[in-house]
Amino acid sequence: MSVLGGRGKGKGNVRMAALGAVLALLLVPSAGVAWAETGGAGTGGADKAAVGTGSAATAVAAGGPSVKLSASQAGTGGSVTVSGGGWRPRTLLMLLICGQSVPSRGVIGGTNSCANADGRAVTTDAKGAFRRELPVAEPPKPCPCVVHVATVTGAKAEADALFMVAGHSVEPLPKEPSGGRLSVLTDTRLDGSSGLLTWFGSPPARTLVFTVGNVGTAAVKNPVFRVGTSHGVFAPQWEEQEWRGTVAPGRKARISLPVELPAGAHGDYTVSLVYGGKVLAEQPWGVGRPWGVTVFWVLLCVVVPAAVFRVGMALVDRVRPHRPAGRAGRHRGLRLTWPTLRPPRPATAGPRTPATVPTVPPAPAALPWFTPDSDPGTAAHGRLSAPHENGPTPQTREGHT
């Protein structure tokens, strides 16, 4: 009886405990919610973790581009699929894993904090979306890490998504400066123009003008800016420039910094302005080709050969032997004339009067290869005309006829 009584008492206690739990859930709904959030049902905790993972791996800017990761954590040697939308159509993007960064503060230290060697590039489609697999690599800076997506050309646009590199060191982020902070208030511009020397390859120079405001609580004295120039997809070439002056809290100042490119530079350039590890502004700069250099080389290729030819001809004319003056004059005065045919004189012609005497053209000059003695028309060789009636009778072989 005692055994049966004990069993019945145990069953009664279980029933009372179950009834109390049901009454607690019905009367205190917040308790049920808290119990579900703590994973009391076994699968509720896993679902909550999945929801947290999805929210942490997605970064959406209000009215801007978005980035989504297939996983919030992966080890070195693995890969993660990066997708996004809201970007400009047909735009080249750069995907990087960067350390010492969070979406709220951006990439601290710029791309020097990223695994640049293992980055990937992708081009958005006609709707501004993309999808690309990114290999996981350890960045040079400790985590917290992000997957940084930014445009390569055109207007600046970027977005970050939290990512954890398994096995990589984790350190707290550097504290933000509690003093003065500068922010660009107006759009930057490049003042100046190219001159004649720039057309012949002189270094192009401009002045970067912008207005900054101090949004911090302390004054900023003699701020040091980093000005970088990049050509195409190449990394910027940075140069530190100090601006002499003080910007009080809540005040603004107009700053002008000189910018210069290498000699002979031409094409599309981008001027970047960085202060305190953050990119404040970017300004495109289109530089024309130095056509004066091209014209100079074309003229050089034409003038130099012509000058060498003239000098060579002058040397040849000076070195070659000269002919004697007398011989040269005799040969220069020779003229070749054609003999003139004269019609035979009629035998019965009467005496001619001066009025009927035809004008006889002058006798041609003797040819150089005939001398007066050897001319067949002279008396030494006899007459060349037909025989006269009163002349001697010609002889034949058989005798006189």
Image (cartoon, rainbow, N blue to C red):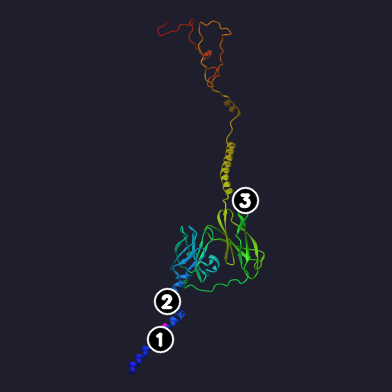
Question: Magenta residues, as a range?
Answer: 15-22
Q: Which mark is residue 44?
A: 2
Look at the image and say whether residue 344 sits in the magenta stretch.
no
Q: Earlier in the sequence, mark 3 or mark 2?
A: 2
Q: Amino acid at mark 3?
A: Leu
Query: In this rendering, does residue 145 appear at all?
Result: yes
Residue 335 position, x and y percent, is: 56, 23
Look at the picture and state if 33 lies above or below 360. below
Q: Which residue is mark 3?
A: 197
Residue 141 position, x and y percent, is: 52, 70
For the residue labelled by badge 1, is the local secondary structure a helix, a strand or a loop?
Answer: helix
What secondary structure is the magenta-colored segment mainly?
A: helix
Disc 2 versus disc 1: nearer the observer = 1
Residue located 45% across and 82% down the image: 27
Q: Amino acid at mark 1?
A: Ala
Query: Looking at the image, which is closer to me, 318 or 153?
Result: 153
Spot the residue most to the bottom.
2
Q: Which mark is residue 17?
A: 1
Look at the image and say whether residue 17 sits in the magenta stretch.
yes
Lateral position of residue 26 relative to residue 247, left or right:
left
The number of numbered badges drawn on the structure is: 3
Residue 46 position, x and y percent, is: 42, 75
Q: CA distance from mark 2 to mark 1?
A: 22 Å
Look at the picture and state if 3 lies above or below 385. below
Disc 3 versus disc 2: nearer the observer = 2
